[in-house]
Amino acid sequence: MSDFEPAARLVEDSYPVTELPLCQLRLMDDARFPWLVLIPRRLEVSEVFQLDAPTQQQLWREASAVGRAMLEALGGDKLNIASLGNVVAQLHVHVIVRRREDAAWPSPVWGHGQAEAYDLDRLAQMRARILAEVEGLDLASGE
């Protein structure tokens, strides 16, 4: 879908990582948390129910597979997957690896303290790590 553009706020608050079969995968610019955002490349969609059933399944497949890979790679205690859309209406799904010692535990990460922007070295390392983890995922079959 060549007309697809992520919402301006998502672009401002995150870095592109890669394109998955359905979603654009982005890294939130908050180094306190391993926090990804999946944005389905669908125009004018704000709710999951607006997607047809196969597309809903693909969204969940991508969020689950990326989340599982990141949780295992980074050794977190819990995985949070959420779609809120209170600030940005465009459908997007947060995938966040949580640790009991993180800055917001056990509360949600959004709205908690000040974001810590990635420096260029740490950003490059995290982006490379994410790419390495998602590269081998079979997102068409959910494996």
Image: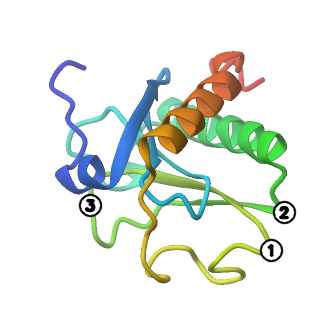
Q: In this view, does 104 lie to the left or right of 100?
A: left
Q: Can residue 56 be seen in this view?
A: no
Amino acid bearing label 2: Asp
Residue at image position (49%, 20%) is 21
Residue at left offset 80%, top offset 39%: 73
Q: Which amino acid does label 1 sit on?
A: Arg
The answer to whether residue 135 is left or right of residue 37 is: right
Q: Name the residue under label 3.
A: 89
Based on the displayed image, in which of its 4 quarters is residue 52 positioned?
top left
Residue 141 picture location, percent across and down: 70, 19
Find disc 2 in the rendering and name its residue.
77
| Residue under the image location 40 percent in, 50 percent down | 92
Q: Which of 97 and 84 is in front in this view?
A: 97
**Mark positioned earlier in the residue sequence (3 or 2):** 2
User: Looking at the picture, does residue 47 appear above or below residue 132?
Assistant: below
Of 65 and 117, nearer the camera is 117
Mark 3 vs 1: CB contact within 8 A: no
- Which residue in the protein does label 1 denote? 100
How far apart are labels 3 and 1 at the CA level?
A: 30 Å
| Discs 3, 2 touching: Cβ within 8 Å | no
Q: In this view, does 99 lie above or below 36?
A: below
Assign a secondary structure to mark 2.
loop
Q: Position of residue 87 (x, y in %)?
A: 28, 70
